[in-house]
Image (cartoon, grey):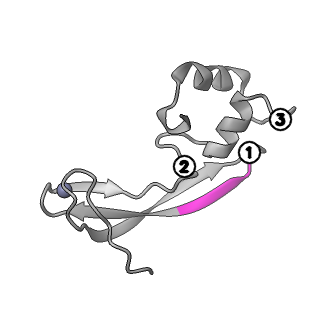
């Protein structure tokens, strides 16, 4: 484990790691990857934050890369439904900007 500081995005204080949560993400071919996301608590705000790596978009089942590839139509074959891709396009996902 690295000793990098985990800074609260709200108050800039150091947060304490309180555990981790498993998160499954699918890539463009539907293959699943398991991530372990650290959960941290800010003792100033009393808020629990979950660390989200760059390749994961909150509340999305697919990886960022998979979503970008699908939206841009860079792949002839994907496992997600057309309606899912259509929804992503309409959502204007902030993490993709
Ligand atoms: Zn805080």
Q: CA distance from mark 3 to mark 2?
A: 19 Å
Q: Which residues are magenta?
A: 31-35
Can you tell which of label 1 and label 2 is closer to the viewer? 2
**According to the image, label 1 marks what residue?**
30
Q: Is residue 97 above or below residue 83?
A: below
Identified at 65% across, 20% down, the residue is 86
Q: Is residue 54 above or below residue 30?
A: below
- Is ligand 1 less than 8 Å from the beta carbon at label 1? no
Identified at 14% across, 54% down, the residue is 45
Q: Position of residue 49 (x, y in %)?
A: 31, 55
- When asked about the image quadrant of residue 7, the answer is bottom left
Q: CA distance from mark 3 to mark 1?
A: 13 Å
Q: Position of residue 8 (x, y in %)?
A: 26, 58
Question: In terms of depth relative to the viewer, which is nearer, 72 or 25?
Answer: 72
Q: Residues within 10 Å of mark 1 (few under 14, many from 20)?
A: some
Label at residue 72: none
Q: Position of residue 90 (x, y in %)?
A: 57, 18
**According to the image, label 2 marks what residue?**
56
Residue 21 part of the magenta segment = no
In the rendered view, does 78 fall on the left or right side of 60?
A: right
State which tag comes first along the sequence, 1 or 2.
1
Identified at 22% across, 50% down, the residue is 10
In the rendered view, does 91 fall on the left or right side of 47?
A: right
State which tag comes first along the sequence, 3 or 1.
1
Q: Secondary structure at mark 2?
A: loop
Q: Residues within 10 Å of mark 3 (few under 14, many from 20)?
A: few
Ligand 1 quadrant assignment = bottom left
């Amino acid at each position: 484990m690295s000793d990098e500081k985990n800074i609260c995005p709200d108050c800039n204080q150091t947060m304490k790691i309180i555990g981790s949560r498993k998160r499954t993400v699918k890539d463009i071919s539907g293959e699943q990857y398991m991530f372990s996301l650290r959960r941290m608590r800010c003792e100033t705000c009393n808020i629990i934050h979950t660390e989200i790596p760059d390749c994961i978009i909150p509340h999305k089942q697919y990886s960022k890369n998979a979503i970008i590839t699908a939206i841009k139509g860079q792949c002839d074959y994907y496992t997600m439904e057309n309606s899912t891709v259509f929804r992503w396009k309409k959502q204007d996902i902030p993490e993709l900007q």
